[in-house]
Image: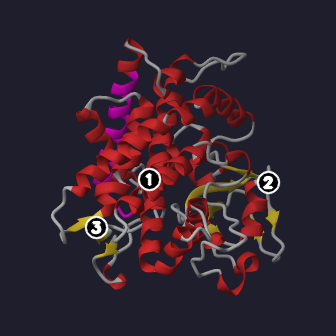
Amino acid sequence: MVAWAISTQSTLKRLLTDPRVSKDPRQHWPAWINGEISQEWPLITWVAVENMFTSYGTDHRRLRTLISKAFTARRTAALRPRIEEMCADLLDTLAATESGEVVDLRDAYAYPVPIQVISELFGMDDEHLVARMRRVVDSIFHTSATPEEVTATYTELYSVLGELVATKRENPGDDLTSGLLAVRGEGDDAKLSEKELTDTLALFLSAGHETTVNLLDNAIHALLTRPEQLEHVRAGRATWEDVVEETLRYSAPVANLPLRYAVEDIELDSGVVLRKGDAIVAAYAAAGRDPQVHGEDADRFDVTRNLKNHLAFGHGVHLCVGAPLARLEAMIALPALFERFPRLSLAVGQDALEPVESFISNGHRTLPVRLS
């Protein structure tokens, strides 16, 4: 499969708001329409779902309107005390670690914070179901997966979400799953279909978890490898919000996001023409370091940078609805960690760190640290 990767910020912003660019493969991607894409393709989950992520035009407006009724600013804000409690509990567990012992902070802190938040948001209190969900998330972002793993992941994803929906239909609560089941709009499509419901939960699961894991992972790594940047925060020359936004710019949690499709021929300023039906990849990580926007030092992490423009959460009508929640989690988890462990340090050299094995996800496989 061939696609255009758009990496300059101005061109990407233009395409993300251009009505001639679609996210619906069923309408606008000939390779999908003609049956050329195998169900064992590693990116199949990112294309086959039917939710806001893969909708276009009036379909997208309908879905976003319905989902916005369930996923409100109030629901996000209400999670603050629980996020603070989750972080405190995890930090207590870390504090019990023997002095000098190496801890994988991605696995022990960056990962469990968002998975617990998503579980809370979904109203998922079955630990066995949460464990299955965690395995599914890991595999969704494994874009080099074998055909067997892809098939197994797809099956397990809908098994987990199907069980969750069935439970909430029987016993609704004050959670997102119950809210999506109850939401109603106007007209013939006044509610989410069964597939739209499960695929919307899949969207929250994939987009709402891994992105926050990587945001925390990358922010911690950046501060530990650049102590002068952490000192800016401690001295009051920068804020934790500066840390979060500069991390999103410098190391976007999602490096590349598939797919969009040209509804008709589109000529770019460079003279390049995207032909009708061409696939498009949004290269968010590259766009964050665009020298045309951030100058010659675009590749430098600097929390005092005045302009931190990025597209880490997308742009236009498909701007991530979970962005406020991801920012909230980071704004709680990061200061709590560095206040609890002021002598936190990386336990290995930078060369020893390996990236996650993914075309989409942008983080480290492990983040070994010493707490003191």
Q: Residues within 10 Å of mark 1 (few under 14, many from 20)?
A: many
What residue lies at 64% left-to-right and 73% top-to-bottom?
A: 304
Residue 309 location, x and y as percent?
70, 66
- State the separation of the CA atoms marked 3 and 1: 15 Å
In the rendering, at what x and y percent does residue 262 appear?
Answer: 72, 56
- Pointer 3 or 1: first along the chain: 1
Please, what is the three-letter code of the amino acid marked with disc 1?
Ala
Q: Amino acid at mark 3?
A: Leu
Q: Which mark is residue 43?
A: none
Look at 63% across and 52% down and name the residue there: 30
What span is in magenta? Answer: 142-165
Residue under label 3, please give it: 371
Are discs 3 and 2 less than 8 Å apart at CB?
A: no
Pointer 1 residue: 333
Report the side of 24 relative to 178 (left or right).
Answer: right
Q: Which of the numbered marks, if any, corresponds to residue 18?
A: 2
CA gap between label 2 and label 1 equals 36 Å
**Residue drawn at x 75%, y 75% as measured from the top left:** 293
| Residue 18 lies within the magenta run | no
